[in-house]
């Protein structure tokens, strides 16, 4: 039950005051309004309280002026403006803003999605497989960031690559841009392996050593193969540059063969079947060079490969000719699908001065006698670990007079040299390569771009 209150004082206010929105009222001064309020208060009457009760005094409540309301509205408007989200910055030309700043949400663009076929169609709608993908989202995001860096760098390099450039200048421009866009941070983010810029009959693993004066020529066929990584999640992707349109069919052969390999790849697909499909497409092309017609051949002793964390060659090989391994591709694996088309023998051998090296992934502790070799190994472990490197990278981190120590590490089996791989002299080789991810529900070509 509610308790009834004793009689309280009643206040009677006579008359009302109008507030108009026209300019005359809006511009009225605060003092005149205050005066009007005071006059009204003087007219207030208070009923006498009953015996035994005390008088109640009402405090004077200040009335805000129209100006006060106007100022408050202006402040609120300014506050709302300041709360507007800043738009992410746009990439400069040449690219200089780290990719992470272009995507402040931390979500990086997905690669090209290709659906599985035949017996794997059920994966597309499987809730169990979708949940597996959600758990792997951080890994996917890391490799997508590395892929976006690769796309932006190669787009710029395609614009500036011209006959007459020093090969070493081209490589260092590319590598410095990768370091900037990926926000290089020790072994957590950076370059995955040296920039391969092999020319003509050299198919792979050539990059200029310090002091090299090789110049890019109009009639050269250059394979640009470079890698990026975030937390050891490697994107291995390559393309071929040729200024003379005479070589266009050769480039098209390897590009279409690579796309065929990507299309054929999938969970439970045998590696030999991918190789057979690649060879069929590659060798359907011919190229006429200086009046002579050559059939394009797949280089039979070069392969694509599986990719692991901090491991560019993770154990499985993807052949580019028929008759390879019966091993199957598996869910969750990363693969570099790469093809090499040649006008030569279609077989490579090691030749020329070595520039590429890599510490063996599974190597245990091996005692070393030379103090200089121990010191060089410490530098390699700190800066590269099991990622590939070249002599220029050792120069960059301050190493000097290291060739004897490097040979000692190679002889001990700790470091593996990777000399240039060459077909017969006078021939031409083209290459295209993409990194793919066999997700539980679909196949993602993470390095796909508008260019290839």
Image (cartoon, rainbow, N blue to C red):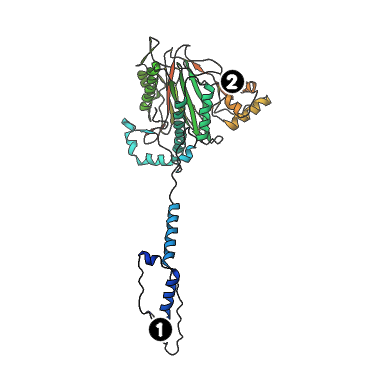
Q: Pick the residue in front: 194 or 139.
A: 194
Residue 385 locus on image (x, y percent): 57, 31
Task: State which quarter of the image contains the C terminus.
Answer: top left
- Which residue is found at the position 32% from the left and 34% from the top? 121
Return the x and y of residue 128 as percentages of the image width and height. 37, 41
Question: Quick check: 380 left or right of 170?
Answer: right
- The residue depicted at 51 percent of the width and 32 percent of the height is 178
Question: Secondary structure beneath disc 1?
Answer: strand
Q: Which residue is mark 2?
A: 211
Disc 2 and disc 1: Cα gap in Å?
Answer: 103 Å
Q: Secondary structure at mark 2?
A: loop
Q: Is residue 82 visible?
A: yes
**Residue 93, percent across and down?**
46, 33
Viewer-closest of 236 and 178:
178
Q: Residues within 10 Å of mark 1 (few under 14, many from 20)?
A: few
Residue 46 point in image, percent of width and height: 41, 84
Q: Is residue 372 left or right of residue 136?
A: right
Q: Earlier in the sequence, mark 2 or mark 1?
A: 1
Occupied quadrant, residue 341: top left
Q: Residue furthest front?
A: 24
| Discs 2/1, front | 1
């Amino acid at each position: 039950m509610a308790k009834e209150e004793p009689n309280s004082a009643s206040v009677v206010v006579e008359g009302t005051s109008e507030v108009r929105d026209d300019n005359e009222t809006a511009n009225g001064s605060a003092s005149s309004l205050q005066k009007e309020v005071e006059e009204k208060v003087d007219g207030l009457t208070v009923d006498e309280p009953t015996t035994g009760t005390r008088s109640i005094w009402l405090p004077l409540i200040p009335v805000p002026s129209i100006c006060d309301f106007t100022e408050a509205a202006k402040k609120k408007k300014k506050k709302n403006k300041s709360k507007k989200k800043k738009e992410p910055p746009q990439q400069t030309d040449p690219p200089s803003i780290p990719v992470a700043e272009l995507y402040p949400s931390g979500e990086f663009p997905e690669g090209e999605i290709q659906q599985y076929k035949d017996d794997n169609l059920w994966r597309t709608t499987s809730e169990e497989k979708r949940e597996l993908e959600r758990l792997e989202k951080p890994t996917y995001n890391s490799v997508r960031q590395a892929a976006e860096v690769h796309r932006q760098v190669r787009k710029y390099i395609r614009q500036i690559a011209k006959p007459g450039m020093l090969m070493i200048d081209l490589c260092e421009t590319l590598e410095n841009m990768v370091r900037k866009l990926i926000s290089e941070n020790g072994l957590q983010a950076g370059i995955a392996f040296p920039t391969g810029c092999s020319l003509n009959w050299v198919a792979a693993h050539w990059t200029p050593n310090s002091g090299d004066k090789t110049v890019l020529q109009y009639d050269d066929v250059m394979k640009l193969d470079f890698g990026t990584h975030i937390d050891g999640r490697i994107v291995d992707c390559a393309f071929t540059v040729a200024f003379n349109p005479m070589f266009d069919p050769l480039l098209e052969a390897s590009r279409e063969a690579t796309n065929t390999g990507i299309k054929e790849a999938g969970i439970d697909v045998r590696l030999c079947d991918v190789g057979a499909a690649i060879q069929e497409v590659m060798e359907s092309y011919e190229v006429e060079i200086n009046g002579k017609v050559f059939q394009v051949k797949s280089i039979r002793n070069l392969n694509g490969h599986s990719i692991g964390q901090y491991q560019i060659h993770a154990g499985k090989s993807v052949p580019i000719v028929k008759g390879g391994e019966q091993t199957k591709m598996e869910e969750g694996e990363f693969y570099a699908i790469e093809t090499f088309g040649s006008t030569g023998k279609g077989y490579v051998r090691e030749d020329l001065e070595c520039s590429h090296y890599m510490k063996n992934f599974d190597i245990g502790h091996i005692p070393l006698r030379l103090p200089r070799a121990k010191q060089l190994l410490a530098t390699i472990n700190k800066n590269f670990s099991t990622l590939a490197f070249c002599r220029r990278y050792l120069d960059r981190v301050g190493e000097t007079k290291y060739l004897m120590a490097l040979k000692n590490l190679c002889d001990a089996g700790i470091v593996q040299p990777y000399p240039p791989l060459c077909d017969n002299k006078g021939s031409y080789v083209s290459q295209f390569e993409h990194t793919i991810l066999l997700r539980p529900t679909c196949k993602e070509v993470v390095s796909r771009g508008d260019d290839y």
